[in-house]
Amino acid sequence: MQLTELRIRDFRNLVDVELEPCSGLNLVSGPNASGKTSLLEAIFYLSYLRSFRTTNLSDLINHNARDFQLFAMAKDQRQKEIPIGIRRGKILLEVRADHQEIKRVADMTAMLPVLAIHPDSYKLVTGSPSDRRSYLDWGVFHVEHGFYQAWQRYRKALSQRNAALRSGYNRSFCTAWDHELDSAAKTIDASRSRYVQNLKVHLKTKIDTFFPGSQVRIDYRSGWSRDYRLSAVLEQTFDRDRRRGFTQAGPHRADLLIEVDGKSAQSGISRGQQKVLVALLRLTQLEQFTRATSRQCILLYDDLAAELDPHYRRQLLALLNQMPVQLFLTAIEPEQIDKGPWANVRRFHVEHGHIVRLER
Ligand SMILES: Nc1ncnc2c1ncn2[C@@H]1O[C@H](COP(=O)(O)OP(=O)(O)OP(=O)(O)O)[C@@H](O)[C@H]1O
Ligand SMILES: [Mg+2]
């Protein structure tokens, strides 16, 4: 999918914005606080119906408005044009795509695959296991059939089991969901494990280029001891689960262990290196997505130049140029980005929430 038209009304400081992006590199420049990240955030919202930097809806609605509106025309790989429209107020939520009402976020995410890399993305390395699970599950969701259904089943059973644990029901009532959890966990775990195996293979060549001589280790942790079936572990840990009031083992506790030269990537490498590593993890995921689905993804890259030296910048831009994506890239100064390798480029300048297209 790629966007051919975008209209934004009352989203943060973007009161009335229209642009026609190209299928290659869309370079968005402008001073601090002009609205660059907000533009990427609006595109992100089209796919996820949420922001990557706030969970507070009123942050997104322009201070002088009651709701925001996003309209996009997307083109799929068969050149079919699909209109997408979103209107979001404090209570109101209307989402339409391809002339139909969309009821589930997952349907929108599946239709319009979007990935974002932004200055906070290094949290994939330094943050909590849930940051890594959401990284992992974006890929698994798009690539592995059956994962989403299994995950839905698992989440439902888990919340019922946890509610029963907290309500002090007897043991057989609380464990009534163990069989369902076990069966869904098997599918989730197999999908994630296959996905990570594949990811590691394709990550390797990039690591060798960006971190020559270093060993980067990625290990998938399933969330319980895989020597046992989940149902057996749940049986064993029941008393503790009951005391704490929630289920402690299972795929909802999965994680990725990331090490560089035997040291945790959380503390053993510099901030710039963490950013590069996260970009490589994301871009590998993106390639894997295209390989598995033959679909094009939209990549939002916010402030690539921040905290990166010219060498890493050049290397990353060269890699991005190889990616089968429609790319939106922001920079304070357009000179920070060497757009030379791109045949297909459009430049936009943002100032106080207004966006104008620049000559190439
Ligand atoms: N709900 C809102 N209504 C109006 N303005 C808002 C709202 N939320 C944020 N803003 C303002 O929008 C402006 C644009 O913010 P944004 O983060 O998009 O800037 P930016 O161009 O990415 O800046 P930087 O280069 O510093 O990252 C800021 O001045 C911010 O205060
Ligand atoms: Mg910004």
Image (cartoon, rainbow, N blue to C red):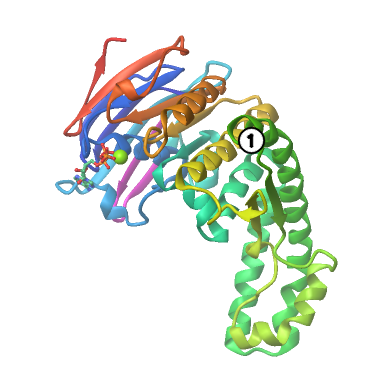
Task: Give the side of residue 320 with respect to residue 255, left or right.
Answer: left
Tell me: residue 329, above or below residue 253.
above
Tell me: residue 188, above or below residue 6.
below
Quarter of the rendering occupied by the C terminus: top left
Magenta-highlighted stretch: main secondary structure? strand
Say which residue appears at 63% left-offset and 28% top-offset. Answer: 290
Question: In the image shown, does 297 or 170 lie closer to the viewer?
Answer: 297
Q: Secondary structure at mark 1?
A: helix
Quadrant of the image occupied by residue 119: top left
Say which residue appears at 32% left-offset and 38% top-offset. Answer: 37
Residue 131: x and y, percent? 53, 55
Residue 177: x and y, percent? 72, 73
Residue 1 appears in the figure: no
Residue 35: x and y, percent? 25, 36
In the image, ligand 1 is in what quadrant?
A: top left
Looking at the rendering, the stretch of residues picked out in magenta corresponds to: 84-95
Tell me: residue 194, above or below residue 238.
above
Question: In the image shown, does 291 or 273 lie closer to the viewer?
Answer: 273
Say which residue appears at 60% left-offset and 54% top-offset. Answer: 133
Q: Amino acid at mark 1?
A: Ile
Residue 65 appears in the figure: yes
| In the image, residue 92 lies in the stretch drawn in magenta | yes
Tell me: residue 7, above or below residue 47.
above
Disc 1: which residue: 207
